Amino acid sequence: MADNATILATLQSRFTSGIERSDIYRDDASVTIAPEQLLDVARFARQEASLSFDLLLDVTAVDYLGQQARFEVVHHLYSTKHHHRLRLKTRVLEKEPIVDSVVPVWVGANWLERETFDMYGVRFRGHPDLRRIYMYEEFQGHPLRKDYPKERRQPLIGPGSPQGNYQPAIPEIPGLTHVEGLLGAELMRVQLGPSHPATHGTVRILLDLDGETIVNADVQVGYLHRGFEKECESGFYYQAIPYTDRLNYSSAILCNVGYCMAVEKLFGAEVPPRCQFIRVIGGEIARIADHLLCVGATALELNAFTPFLYALQARELIWDLVNAMCGARVTSNFVRIGGVSADLPAGFADQCRAAFKRLLELVEDTEGLLLENPIFRARMEGVGVMSAERLIEYGVTGPLLRAAGVDLDLRRAQPYLVYDQLDFDVPLGTQGDNMDRFLVRLAEMRQSVRIVEQCLKMIPDGPIDIDDPALRFPGKGRVYGRMEELINQFKLVTEGQKPPPGEVYVGTESANGEIGYFLVSDGTGKPYKCRARTPSFSNTQPLAELVRGRLLADMVPTFDMINMIGGECDR
Amino acid sequence: MGLEILIAAVKALTVILMVLSLAGVLGWVERKGSALIQDRIGANRASIFGFAGAGLVNTMMADPLKFLTKEDVIPTGVDKLLHTLAPCVNLFPVIVAFAAVPFGDTVEIAGRTIQLQAVQLNVGVLFVLAMASLGVYGVVLGGWASNNRFSLLGGIRGSAQMISYELGMGLSVVVVVMTFGTLDLQEIVRAQGHMIGGILPGWGVFYQPVAFVLFFIAGIAETKRVPFDLPEGESELVSGYFTEYSGIKYLMFFMTDFAEIAVISALVSTFFFGGWQVPFLGDDGFHFGSTSMALPKLIVVLLQLASFMVKVLFFCWFQIMVRWTMPRLRYDQLMRFGWKGMLPVSLLNLVVTAVVIVAFQEWRV
């Protein structure tokens, strides 16, 4: 692992003129490069052995309205070899917002650049398929631009089409050229979704079938897009926490934790140890819930209904634990900036152990019905295989990547909270097929149980909140009786926490991979930019390639193992 | 003559009612059975005056009522005649197939000998197989007439699957026919009345265990149930060939499903488990070696009827158990299993049986 200074020095020695600015802020290395140099820098960052940034995590833009070089295109890079990060920034003019596409370097940039184009109107030169991705084709304007009012509504009809008879535009898709089938027959175009039993995240998959074989596929996401970033930018920092719940609603606490850590990083603050333990406990419990759903839903989609209900019964136990922690079950809104909403209740450790005991029994029942079943194995083994290199190129992280044998778990690679004090294994697969993905998830559940059990033993006494009035709301009891705290509370509620200007990126290991928050602060109480890099988005991207040439029925377990969570993918 | 017609009508009605009510019962058993497996309570809402204890009866009444009162949607752009015909074509052969299945021996009422079988056919086996094959038309019609690509795929899958598995089914039945030397289902059952070595009932399963396994698997495939429910395949094809059906037509597809379970169970009992035969029970009572227990004829007949029902219900239950523990096969795996797995095994079974029968004439039952 090269430290940030070395990374920047390596880049500067290679590109003497192209690098306009480089800095390290809160341990994040970032360089600003001239637009014409972007592709070269990207290639160099990927190929240079001491850097080898092989994983493109995120592409987005920041809109500095009023400045001549209005848009700043931001790339976040990660090296699976050295486990270090880099942020590339490129300023483009308002008149001509064009920048080189980095698809030739990382395939995974495809959707990310489409999103940036859709949201900000920045065009990418050399992009193979620059369509809108979230909004519909007839949408006017680019919603994340600062001059697009949040309140503006647009009718969901195309220009010229009579109201109530909306026919979605089906654009020409480069991947979907019309080819003839095996016997010279015409291909059959089938639309899976957005309302289809197998697409439980609201996604539309256009398939061209030759008999039952998938010749071409186009995955269209965005049906659950609700403007996460726009909403966050229009509220205070603390108001965004419930929105993060609704990213991955099956493991909400993990999304909370990442966001609050990012805001704390903007402040340069660290929460007390007890709080860190509680966050780990909450997060790992949420991870179990997420994996249970994924494992159960996969069984369900293969028509093994019984294991699904066993898994959901186990998940019910998890929801009871979350309920005990914070009074809510699914979208728990548990973590706070600078703390958590409540301390662990009395007797929580015993409740946890009892729940885990039953949970592991149920997981064993689920496994027992599936793992030894030849039909299940035949459906999962050797299906949806993709090499580790290709997955990384696509920006895939999490269990999918680990199933292909890549040892990348941020809890181990870049330990945050108290993960460095805990003893746990990172389960890895060998083949990278659906069976491995399934097994990795099962194994991760057991590791999470192990982690929580250790945390319950190790958790120290002490405060759960940062003792900093600028950051953390005072407790309700004190607000009601004391003047100072009342004023403090009033100021925080009406003005929000005000971090110093700067920008940070925090990546944490969520259930499906790296969930990263990129926050830009301008010193006010509202985030200037609040970007969530979500694993589901990047993980869904290779789906078309994974199913091409396979049978229609193989779509189902592959899509399930990707575990696309609609809220997280579409934001 | 009039009496003959009356007797025939009563028998036909009995069979139809038996199949339909069995289908209704199975609908309830499937719900309650799956609930039992899955740690749930299951159907408990259909109650009369708050009394849910008679769940079976209530569900049997509530289900058809619900479907009857639902709107019958016919999508635009479909051939209305074919669309309506499909569920009927699907349900009809299943009920008719039951006509040849004997559910008891003969009874004598007022000097008249009555066969407990709707129709006495000396080619009963062929008739049953023919009716099972007709079922494919309902599936194809439903898929074709729905003007829906998922339905079409389901229909294609269904026809390919049913035709493929008919081979294995037919060959395993041929073996049974060779063993018992008759095509008459009643004769096949009668031939299973003896005891092997005085302890083992002379059921077909003990002569042809391989054929039993093959027939049962092919039977589940014919009924299009898990793990062979690809034509429905709801995670890929929404509901397959009956995606576009609602109301009473949907109920007919639904009933076919359960009626097919009942027919397959009846056939398995008939071919391999002695049909209405009760071990050690002869025409006049039980015979255990030298000791015997005389019973009136009526009791014997009732015992035989009960024996048949118990066997049928057991296999229905078994199929439901399979349904709730197995995942679904994939299309190519299904075809491979049918053509490369079942067909060679059943051919081999046929050859071995033929050789054994020719070599040891006396082994013939």
Image (cartoon, coloured by chain):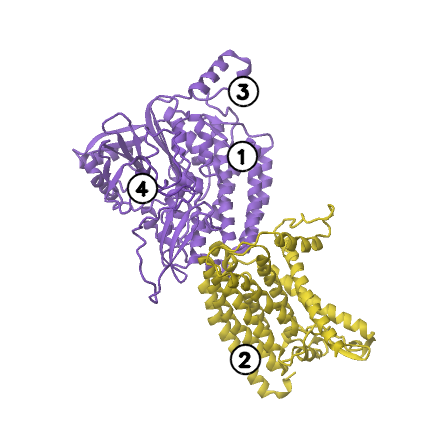
Q: Chain of mark 3?
A: A
Q: Residues within 10 Å of mark 1 (few under 14, many from 20)?
A: some
Q: Colour of chain A?
A: purple
Identify the residue under disc 3.
Answer: A476
Q: Earlier in the sequence, mark 3 or mark 1?
A: 1
- Mark 3 vs mark 1, foreground winner is 3
> Which quadrant, please, contains the C terminus of chain A?
top left
- Label 4 to label 1, Cα distance in Å? 44 Å
User: Residue A456 shows which numbered tag?
Assistant: 1
**Dot 2: what SS?**
helix
Verify CB contact (< 8 Å) between mark 3 and mark 4.
Answer: no
- Mark 1 vs mark 2, foreground winner is 2
Amino acid carrying label 4: it is Arg
User: For the view shown, which residue lies furthest in the top direction?
Assistant: A483
Amino acid carrying label 2: it is Leu
User: Residue B350 shows which numbered tag?
Assistant: 2
User: For the view shown, which residue lies furthest in the left direction?
Assistant: A17
